[in-house]
Amino acid sequence: MAANSASAAESDAMEAQAPLLVDAVKGCVDFKGRHVLHSKSGCWKSASFIIGVEMAERFAYYGISSNMVTYLTGPLRQSTAAAAANVNAWAGTTALMPLLGALVADSFLGRFWTIIAASLLYILGLGSLSVSAALNPSDSSSIDVIFFFFALYLIAFAVGGHKPCLQAFGADQFDDENEKELRSKSSFFNWWIFCLCISTLVGLLALTYIEENLSWALGFGIPCIVMCFALFVFVLGIGTYRFRVQSDRRRNPFVRIARVFVRRAASPERVAIEEEGTHFRFLDQASLESHGEEVCRVNDVEDAKAILKLLPICLACVPFAAVYQQTTTLFTKQGVTMDRHITSSFQVPAAALQAFTAGSIILFVPLYECALLPLARAISHKPTGISLLQRIGAGLVSGIVCMVVAGVIERKRLETALEHGLADLPGETVPMSAWWLIPQYLVMGVADVLTFVGLQEFLYDQVPRELKSMGLALSFAVVGIGGFLSSFLVFVVDKATGGDGRDSWLSDNLNRGHLDYFYWVLAGLNALSLVCYIYFAKSYV
């Protein structure tokens, strides 16, 4: 009788657990390592915490970066070319650091703890930057300036841990095997950039005004306070997060993939491969055998090949990233020379014009999500509407349009300056409204949504499961390399077109320069990269 009761109780327990097992998210656990349920974890409830943290980070980052060229040419008294090169180099480093952050996250700390550590470094960097600005550095060789750049690059290092991990951790909250959540994940990348642009817009309008009219130290200090609050919000959501479980915790994903490349380099015609239950395999017409030495598994080789196939796509997008860098440097310097008055006593800071790029994104994302994407889905029957590669290609075309428009508007500005005899008066305002610059900012916003958001989703989707942070880091690395390319182009063009008493295209006196020529060079370079991209995209499987 007792045995029957025990059996009945055990049967009832199994029946009670069955719905829970069905509702459990495969391959995910909670913070304590327990199974998590679809109904009580992840999705938008978790993503909202993570998006909120990223909004704070973007508020801080753009509040600093958008006006950095003004700070360098103002309090630090650097030339236009030197300031643009420094901003591009810092932006490039900032965008490359996610590769290091992804390595740390995917191999050692995990995404959650990497975000925590990066947030603490971010707060330290912002606090140091505010202290540096309060010291009012004016001599480019002083210890204060060294401290300023130390704080600036500490922020770059912190961004490296923040960017790939936070977005990948947000995407991890959606189950790829659940059709509803899979569709939500596709929308997540679009709404991610939408929310980020709202915070960017606030940062651009509020912080640039504070920096130029009240205090640089206060303008750098407010983001520090905001990041402290963001860290609190991130920890607050810990009970709802899903944590991905690695398929093989004993094997570091970077080590196993790097070993494939090392062995291929050491023995280009023969690579030993082992797979579950199989000792010998043929791959790409190479004889694969072990002889008692450590080998690479078949899935390791396939993962390495998957990453290699992504590189041409990424490299073809680098010239577009160089175009993207102009919004925070040369676009801003254009705006400085133009009439930015709203009333007779108030004028908009030049860096605040970047708000039109953020505004363009804020308007375009709902249009894309609510109108263009459903229409594309109905036609193509794909969850993403158009393919991600098609989306990226459309963005590259938009980048070319942006540079052509920027060149035409700069030509108009130069003609206006000459007409009013201001060619040799760089300190005078050119009687041409800064609102002429709005089209190039708006086009860049559309190009950003199509290219970079599409690239982020594409790379996250295509990399191996254990390397999702690295996939997003690759998209940021494209921006970083583009920053260095832009810095290199600025240096080369400045040296090649200046000297011997001539004003270079990037002269400190923009009225004697030719930014229009530089923009058209970038347009031509991007047209060439578009041709390469189309070739790589067509051959990509």
Image (cartoon, rainbow, N blue to C red):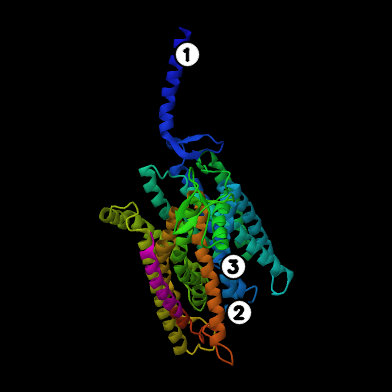
Q: CA distance from mark 1 to mark 3?
A: 68 Å
The residue carrying pointer 1 sits among few (fewer than 14), some (14 to 19) or many (20 or more) residues within 10 Å by Cα, namely few
Q: For the residues carrying marks 2 and 3, which lies nearer the camera in this image? A: 3
**Residue 315 percent across, percent down from the top left:** 47, 67
Query: What secondary structure is found at the residue carrying circle 2?
Result: loop
Q: CA distance from mark 2 to mark 3?
A: 16 Å
In this view, 229 is above or below 34: below
Q: Amino acid at mark 3?
A: Trp
**Residue that carries the numbered disc 1 in the rendered image:** 6
Q: Which residues are magenta?
A: 521-541
- Residue occupied by mark 2: 79
Q: Earlier in the sequence, mark 1 or mark 3?
A: 1
Identify which amino acid the numbered label 2 is placed on. Answer: Ser
Q: Is 193 in the magenta?
A: no
Q: What amino acid is found at the position of numbered circle 1 in the picture?
A: Ala
Q: Secondary structure at mark 1?
A: helix
Q: Residue furthest left?
A: 379
State which mark lies toward you, 1 or 3: 1
The residue located at (36%, 56%) in the rendering is 366
Q: CA distance from mark 1 to mark 2?
A: 84 Å
Q: Which mark is residue 90?
A: 3
Q: Secondary structure at mark 3?
A: helix
x and y percentages locating residue 402 in the rendered image: 41, 73
